[in-house]
Image (cartoon, rainbow, N blue to C red):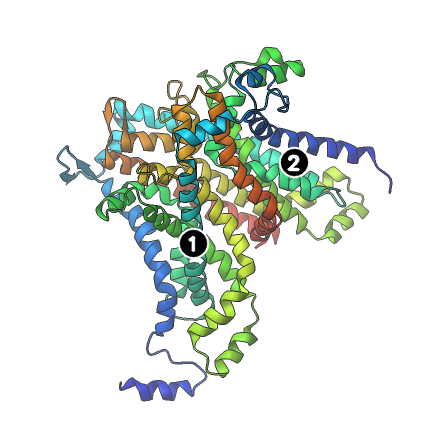
Amino acid sequence: MTIRPGRIAVHIALILYTILALGPIFLILINAFKTRRAIFADPLGLPNGQTWTTIGFDRVFANSDFGLYFFNSLTVTIVSLVLIVLIGAMAAWALTEYRFRGNTILSLYLAIGIMVPIRLGSVSILRMMVELNLVNTLTALILVYVAQGLPLAILILGEFIQQIPKDLRDAARCDGVSEYRIFFSIILPLISPAIATVAVFTMVPVWNDLWFPLILAPGDGKQTITLGVQQFIGQYVTDWNAVLASLTLAIAPVLALYLLFSRYLVRGLTAGAVK
Amino acid sequence: MTDLTASHVQSTDVVPARSRFPIHIVVFLAPALAIYTLFSIYPLVDTIRLSLYTGDETGARSFVGLQNFSTLLTDPNWSGQFWNAFTNNLIFFAIHMVVQNGIGLGLAMLLSLPRLTGGSVYRTLIFLPTMLSVVIIGFIWQLMLNPLWGIAPSLLKAVGLGSLFGPWLGQESTALLTVSLISVWQFVGIPMMLIYAALLNIPDDLLDAATVDGAGPFSVFWFVRLPLILPTLGVVSILTFVANFNAFDLIYAIKGALAGPNFSTDILGTFFYRTFFGFQLQVGSPTMGAAVATAMLVIILIGVLIYLFGVQRRLQRHTF
């Protein structure tokens, strides 16, 4: 194999862009572990024996409920994802498997939510949540996120269900198995690979969202991590150690999960695009 | 249960019973339809309805027709802000279309080169910022560009461009561009991935045939690959459009609800938030907020319809 000069230029371009994409995140991570003096004197240097400190993290944990916010985000994201996958798969199954009057119209009706952002209904959503006494609860967030995530999930899961061979369910029907058991015991286990794809499109926006936590659950210890960080930084804006530490705490779990599962996420994204 | 015999007779037919709507279909569909209708469609419709009302301090509402919209578009207290937010949003969108989707296309072209070593590593790493919260990204860049910390000026100095540096996020003339570029930096991964997937789907035979026919790399790109990925570029454009005209988090995180300096970074999302919740001296108004949301809905729908009936139709005719 010969290395052509063109190839080297391609790699240089890609490496430069990668540095541009990761550099800022990397700088935040390394400076979070440095003393205030070192942050300003040598922002690009790695923390060493002299400059190492975790004082920022101590202050974050002392002055905010980071653990609680993290737990709130985790609860909202996981419950939303489970509901979206389960309810979405049921609907996708009904729409792809059975022919009935109104099928096309229902599919189109559900597709509205793919293009029209639910955020624009916030005025009424807030009114409803006030009436239902759900303000400052995680339930309010979960309900909204499920409604937001369902349309795309139904589209993706529907395409996936279509690829499952017909023989399986026909054989089951001949044996007199009920439609419910066909779905829950045969179809649901088979679509588990599609969950990775659905997760890309639902979990990430839910975890990262600022808008609905800000409007529906801004207090009472129901803040999600994104809102918690936003409120914390607003208060401690001049405390560089604390700001950098809180950012690092927000970045770290996503970073770890992404690097662990990036293979599936990237595959899901490109597969979803092929369509 | 008189129809028992009827359905029995029918079930011997090839077509299954359709006299009664099968209950299991209802069971499968009901949860999704209920949650989606209640918390997505109903609020959207109700918001449009609310935009036709006005409320006073007591909470009593009265129907005013399209008056909120004429206030929004013509009243000097409102229209200046609205059109400012709309124009800024258009600029925000234009920058994304050119820079974000341009770089995304470029990266996708490089990544789809045959037998590129480390391609998946580059893809994974370049996509990484997209996964993080917009709020976090906003704060990261606020620190990076902070003249106090001095990372940006010292890096610029290192490549000989030190004189270019200024408090970009604080100047009225550069704030919107800077905020847009931060957003571009974060979301470049999405067009890159979508276009990359489309490029991979182009059969090698087509490219080989073009090369055999004597087409250079540039002609292959311009006359073979680009036309074939036009539908994907259409999808990328409409996704960018909807996301941009719905954006809020980044501006709110960096500049707050006032979208300073002097509203130079105000877009429709932040304008909507201020109208709804109020700010400083102005009291928030749910009905005016609903009117702004409805205006945003109309703008997004116009974009989607142009895409569905203008762009997508033509592209499909073009490719087949």
Visible residue check, residue B263: yes
Same-chain check, marks 2 and 1: no
Q: Does residue B283 appear left or right of residue B33 in this picture? A: left
Give the answer, above or below, for where B107 lies relative to B318. Answer: above
- Residue name at image x 13 percent, y 39 percent: B60
Q: Which of the numbered marks, if any, corresponds to residue A122?
A: none
> Few, some or many C-alpha atoms within 10 Å of disc 1 (few <14, some 14-19, many ≥20)?
many
What residue does disc 2 label? B106
**Residue farthest toward the right in the current orientation of the protein:** A2
Residue B141 location (% of width, % of height): 52, 25
A147 shown above or below B265: below
Task: Give the Cα separation between the discs numbered 2 and 1.
Answer: 31 Å
- The residue that appears at 43% across and 71% down in the rendered structure is A99
Q: Where residue B226 sits in the image (x, y, percent)?
A: 65, 43
Is residue B180 something that shows in the picture?
Answer: no
Task: Pinpoint residue B187: horizontal percent, then vertical percent.
Answer: 54, 36
In the rendered view, tell whether residue B312 sits above or below residue A229: below
Q: Which residue is mark 1?
A: A151
Tell us which disc is closer to us: 2 or 1. Answer: 1
Locate the C terminus of chain A by quadrant: bottom right
Three-letter residue code for mark 2: Gly
Kindly identify which chain the residue marked by label 1 belongs to. A
Q: Amino acid at mark 1?
A: Pro
Quarter of image, res A48: top right
Residue B41 or residue B129, whichever sits in front: B129
Subunit of label 2? B
Residue at 39% across / 70% down in the picture? Answer: A100
Q: Residue at x 59, y 48 (%)?
A: A261
Up-down relation of residue B201 to residue A23 (above or below): below
Q: Residues within 10 Å of mark 2 (few under 14, many from 20)?
A: some
